[in-house]
Image: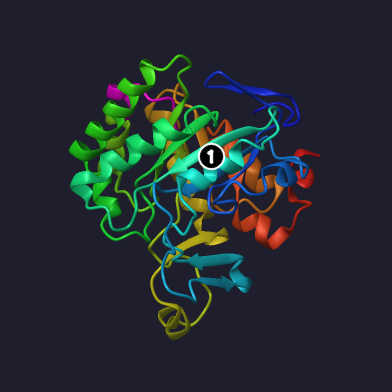
Amino acid sequence: MPGNKEKPVEVFGLKFKNRIGLAAGFDKNAEYINELALLGFSHIEIGAVTPEPQKGNPKPRLFRLSKDKALINRMGFNNEGVENAVKNLKKRKPDIIIGANIGKNTDTPNEKANEDYILLFNKLHDYVDYFTVNVSCPNIKDLKELQDKESLLELLSELKKINRNKAKPKPILLKISPDLTWEQLDDTLYIIEQTGIDGIVAVNTTATRMNLSYPKDKIEQIGNGGLSGKPLKNRSTEMIKYINEKTGGKLPIIGVGGIMTKADMQEKLDAGATLVQVFTGFVYEGPGLVKKLTK
């Protein structure tokens, strides 16, 4: 049983004041870091940031399923690009831990995707504390193909090599999809072991429509997008537990998915997560959620 959540936690060489962070997707452009930090988050993950600005998918692209405390989004990595993110990051307070969730531009073909990730890694390196490589968002055409064994091994190996040559290497994490099969997850864990990256973020949104109480036609009317929130809670915990057992508790895990209450957070910690992040819970429970979770 993990200890008091308000005690600082040291993970991959960084000291977090508590276990609760804000997941990527909320502050895409690093515009509100200092304000969000006042709510009590120990870390904020910006992004997803892409090399060039992009508008994302056509609106409407974000839908509330309030009865189920869920969201469906197909934002499509809408952001102002890496140069804008760097400009905003220069205004951050030094004691806030910032992660950068990085992704390729939608119109970058997969065979050139590594160039996007490398560019982002180099441009953001001096301004963030850790990186999360995002190849699992369901809202970018063909992005999930980068989760394939060979593509992922090549990408993470290259980033690790660049990182080693930096004056101050930064932790590299991988954000995974909840829709991976156990065999695919085993392959992913093998790649993490081979490349020696620092941790895993489990999980991204799901393309499935699990655990929803709404009529099928209502869900079909919404259309494509990643489902987040309470319906994802059990799958997220299941994957965290699997990863923790497979790695003997040696791989740091940031648990994401359906955290609305202190009990939900404790479930993730008991399953093997070291840190957690909220997004949909923050939307539904409001800015007091962090204090509720650390109380």
Q: Which quadrant does the C terminus fall into?
A: top right
Residue located 67% across and 48% down the image: 32
Q: Is residue 131 magenta?
A: no
Q: Is 149 placed left or right of 188 in the picture?
A: left
Q: Position of residue 13 (x, y in %)?
A: 55, 18
- Scheme of image coloration: rainbow
Q: Which quadrant does the N terminus fall into?
A: top right
Could you say which is closer to the camera, residue 276 or residue 240?
A: 276
Instruction: Tell me: residue 43, above or below residue 232.
Output: above
Q: Is residue 199 magenta?
A: yes
Could you say which is closer to the camera, residue 120 or residue 230?
A: 120
Instruction: Tell me: residue 47, above or below residue 42.
Output: below
Q: Position of residue 192 (x, y in %)?
A: 33, 28
Q: Position of residue 97 (x, y in %)?
A: 63, 31
Q: Position of residue 136 (x, y in %)?
A: 36, 49
Residue located 56% across and 59% down the image: 229
Reading the image, the residue beneath label 1 is 86
Residue located 45% across and 14% down the image: 167
Q: Is 183 placed left or right of 82 in the picture?
A: left
Residue type indicated by callout 1: Val
Dot 1 alpha-carbon crowd within 10 angstroms: few under 14, some 14 to 19, many 20 or more = some
Q: Quadrant of residue 9?
A: top right
Label 1: which secondary element: helix
Could you say which is closer to the camera, residue 260 or residue 29?
A: 29
Residue 261 visible within the image: yes
**The magenta segment:** 192-200
